[in-house]
Image: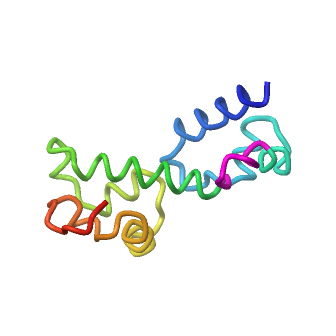
């Protein structure tokens, strides 16, 4: 039951990643849970709700940046379409996660990209 609820919450998150207002309180309200219940669902997963949302957004951006059919989109556009509200914040968290700038990741030039 708990695993199924967690799976459904994660699906809701994936379905709404582009929404900048995808906060724990919004997710909980959308799913009909208290915010505390939502946080409890993520206990034992090794991550928090906020970290999960950020990671899924970063994964979506990384996929888009490497997609040759999306090369015409600016990096900022990729970030905003995945729910980031600041290009500079996106660049910082992207570099922290992947070890290189979004541009270097797109161009596959940086040997330290993960």
- Report x, y in % for residue 101: 28, 70
- Judge left or right: residue 62 versus residue 73: right
Q: Who's the residue at 38% across and 58% down the image?
A: 79
78, 108: nearer the viewer? 108
Could you tell me which quadrant the N terminus lies in?
top right
- Determine whether 114 is above or below 45 in the image: below
43, 102: nearer the viewer? 43
- Determine whether 85 is above or below 61 in the image: below
Residue 58 sits in which quadrant? Answer: bottom left
Q: Who's the residue at 27% across and 61% down the image?
A: 75
Q: Which residues are magenta?
A: 41-49
- Judge left or right: residue 111 versus residue 49: left
Residue 67 sits in which quadrant? Answer: top left
Residue 97 sits in which quadrant? Answer: bottom left
Q: Which scheme is used to colour this image of the protein?
A: rainbow
- Judge left or right: residue 68 versus residue 10: left
- Report x, y in % for residue 15: 53, 35
- Determine whether 101 is above or below 39 in the image: below
- Report x, y in % for residue 23: 66, 54
Could you tell me which quadrant the C terminus lies in?
bottom left
Q: Who's the residue at 49% across and 48% down the image?
A: 56
- Determine whether 5 is above or below 51 in the image: above
What is the chief secondary structure element of the magenta stretch? loop
The tally of labels here is 0
Q: Who's the residue at 27% across and 64% down the image?
A: 113
Instruction: Tell me, yes or no, whether the highlighted magenta stretch contains residue 32.
Output: no
Instruction: Tell me, yes or no, whether the highlighted magenta stretch contains residue 47.
Output: yes
- Report x, y in % for residue 100: 29, 70
- Judge left or right: residue 91 versus residue 73: right
């Amino acid at each position: 039951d708990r695993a199924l609820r967690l799976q459904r919450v994660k699906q809701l998150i994936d379905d709404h990643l582009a929404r900048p207002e995808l906060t724990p309180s919004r997710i909980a309200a959308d799913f009909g849970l208290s915010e505390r219940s939502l946080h409890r669902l993520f206990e034992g997963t090794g991550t928090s709700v906020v970290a999960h949302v950020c990671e899924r957004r970063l994964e979506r951006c990384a996929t888009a940046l490497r997609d040759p059919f999306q090369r015409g989109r600016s990096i900022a556009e990729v970030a905003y379409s995945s729910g980031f509200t600041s290009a500079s914040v996106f660049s910082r968290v992207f570099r922290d996660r992947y070890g290189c700038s979004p541009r270097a990741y797109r161009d596959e030039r940086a040997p330290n990209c993960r």
